[in-house]
Image (cartoon, rainbow, N blue to C red):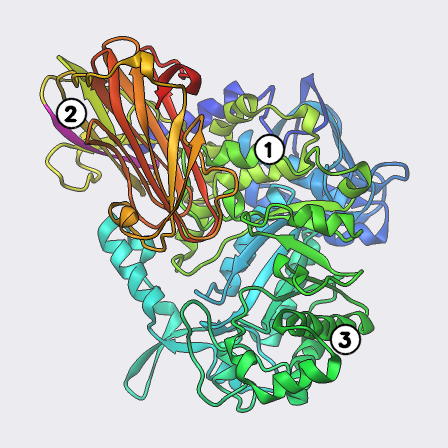
Amino acid sequence: MRKFLSVLFISLVSVVTLAKVDLVPAPQKIAWGQGAYTLPQQSAIVYAQPALKPAAEYLQICLKRYAQTEATVASGKQGDIRLSLKKGLPKDGYELKITTTGIELVGADYGGIMAAIASLNQMLILSSGQSLTSVSISDAPRFGWRGFHLDSSRHFFTCDEVKEFLDLMALYKLNRFHWHLTDDQGWRLEIKKYPKLTEKGAWRIYNNQDTACWQLAARDDNPDLLIPRKNTRVENGDTLYGGYYSQDDIREIVAYARQRGIEIMPEIDMPGHFLSAIENYEGLSCFPTIGWGQFFTTPLCPGKDKVLEFCKDIWREVFELFPYEYVHVGGDEVRKDTWKKCPDCQQRIKGLKLNNEEELQSWFIHQMEAFINKNGRKMMGWDEILEGGLSKTATVTWWRTWVPDAPNQVTAQGNNVIYCPGSPMYLSQAEEKTSMRSIYEYDVNPASMSARQKQHVIGVQGNLWCEYIPTRERAFFQYFPRILALSELAWTKPELKDYEQFYSRLPQQFAMLHQLNVPFRTPSLDGVYRVNAFTCEGTMAVTCADPLATVRYTTDGSFPNKTSQLYSGPVKVDETTHFILRTFAPNGQAGEMIKADFIKQGLLEPVKVDAGKLAQGLNAAWYDYQGETCSDIHKVAFKGNYPVSDVVIPEGVKGRIGLIITGYLNVPEDGVYTFSLMSDDGSWLKIDGNMVVDNNRPQSPHEEISEQALKAGLHKFEVRYFDSNGGMLRLWVFDPQGKKMQPTDIYLK
């Protein structure tokens, strides 16, 4: 019955929205007509220019896949679906017209035609195929670089899985596939001159990332976190995990991407993150002893000429396989302690009159760039390549949010930059309630940049690092739906963007993803928090952004499954109750679990303090802390007190940070108050010594929301926070009516 209802709902969505399909990303101009066009069972696709033949053949595939319609392809101007190029349109711009007599797709270039096909494909899927409402669209992108990054090194994805990623990129007008092919954990690209890179470097005994995936699978009751057996083999009695792409595989995937208007940028990370090669070819490191340091692995030795030649040999084969403008050299997270002790590196520094190891890294990167440029390509690198000096021709992918001025530095020098900041565009990080809005509204043209600098911001990109993402299913769960917000950030002009309107379009997109068997993360349920306080009677009431999903729950601590209690409306509670809620897709696939404790509380009594002797604001005490728990912050060296008006990291507090922020909370009326604490890394909030929000763990930016019943008056207030690599801290307080309270109204010291 549920399967029938789901199918019925999808059909109803299609019928209701026949007059207006909610496209993502939103086009510049769209006008819906009154009539409709029904595709013939045997459609004729024609293309006006020979360069469009691959696009026509791709559309032929799409018609069969999305509309169950056969089509022929031929050169010409008369047909049911007509493809042509037109001068005067912006780059990658297009016009799409559906009338009662046929479909016309006009593009400025091949990319424009592919964008038109993407819009048509969404209409085909959401309109159940053959009957399409008349429409006229005129559209062009905001950015030329609309990036989608995949790390195939930490965990391997098959050729078919990569093709599926490419299909979805095309559907959402993303046109640059940044493919991370090599790293310490695995070398995935066949290099003919150095066969051991894949014979040995592509395979490993299960490592700590694999075991972490198993532990997460058990903790979260999630088989998508298990290591796929298809990517293992047995050798000498050992089970090895891995895989690689042959050069024929690469050629096939490159052709597949090119037909879809997607350029692939390969990344061969160097001089760090190179252990999978260093382990298999002698003489690439400074010393024979290699492995992991405190954070990173043994790097290449830039003091040895043979190392430069080894890298150039690899690039020569890469150039043959990837016929595009850019290659990515990495250049991030390089451990330099071995260089300081290495006679070859020190001789190189002395001979070149360099000042330090940072300049040695810059020299190495410049050597690679000169070779890359000589071979007709351009180099891209992570923003660490700024250190020691940036060449005039390099493009930077900015990821380190704790180096916020990097885009300004890059563009001020006249270099191009791509925005992919770790927060919020690292899609490997857990999705939060605020994640999609943070991506959608991200300011990639800050006021601090001049008009000339803004011209050097060439695009945005979402990055997926796969240390803890071992399967196609988990990868899609991390990509979607956040990648939809990124696609609209990359494509749609700022003046046409509105987050609430975008969010209202998502139910149709969710229905489409369900039809395509794309397992995405259902957005966070609204209506409940981690801790929900009540004094007499509470109500557990949730809403779900995906109308096709169902919500089930338990109260006995067990994991909800497909037979658990179905949520069908608000649930009243009059005693403390511990809910675990879980969403389920129409195909029965389980989503993530949400714990929501409903705690019956009395009103916390205020403390006796003379408010007249207190000033506005809070005190932040900074400690030189490098631990991973809030409870130990006060045990290390004290660095100073800072007056703050809100819960923030004080100006000038950098490096190793442990904060204890104290004062009083001025509560105006009796009631239940809500506290939203977000931090990167860990934090907690205590009121009158009671733990209210416990966010105390090393983590990416994470928001925890809890409630507390408070009596009017003053209450002792303490926030603790620690940071290990780039900080974020903020607290929002909401009154019993749900109104956000201002810091000047509530904080006293």
**Location of residue 475 with respect to 192 vertically, above or below:** above
Q: Nearer the viewer, mark 2 or mark 1?
A: 2
Q: CA distance from mark 2 to mark 1?
A: 41 Å
Which circle marks residue 371 in the picture?
A: 3
Q: CA distance from mark 3 to mark 1?
A: 40 Å
**The disc labelled 1 sits on which kind of residue?**
Val
Horizontal side, residue 330 vs residue 435: left or right = right
Please indicate, yes or no, whether residue 67 appears anywhere in the rendered image: no
Image quarter hosting the C terminus: top left
**The residue positioned farthest toward the top in the image shown:** 669
SS at mark 1 in the image? loop
Horizontal side, residue 93 vs residue 164: left or right = right
The boundaries of the magenta stretch are 576-586
Please indicate, yes or no, whether residue 397 appears anywhere in the rendered image: yes
**Location of residue 462 with respect to 611 vertically, above or below:** below
Q: CA distance from mark 2 to mark 3?
A: 64 Å
Q: Mark 1, residues whose alpha carbon is within 10 Å: few (<14), some, or many (≥20)?
A: many
Q: Main secondary structure of the magenta part?
A: strand
**The disc labelled 3 sits on which kind of residue?**
Phe
**The disc labelled 2 sits on which kind of residue?**
Ile
Q: Circles 2 and 1: CB distance less than 8 Å?
A: no
Horizontal side, residue 502 vs residue 676: left or right = right
Q: Position of residue 321 (x, y in %)?
A: 69, 72
x 46%, y 33%: residue:
510
Which circle marks residue 599 in the picture?
A: 2
**Location of residue 647 with respect to 588 vertically, above or below:** above
The residue indicated by pointer 1 is 24
**The residue positioned farthest toward the front in the image shown:** 613
Q: Circles 3 and 1: CB distance less than 8 Å?
A: no
Q: Quadrant of residue 447?
A: top right
Q: How many marks?
A: 3
Q: Which of 330 and 245 lies nearest the eye of the viewer?
A: 330
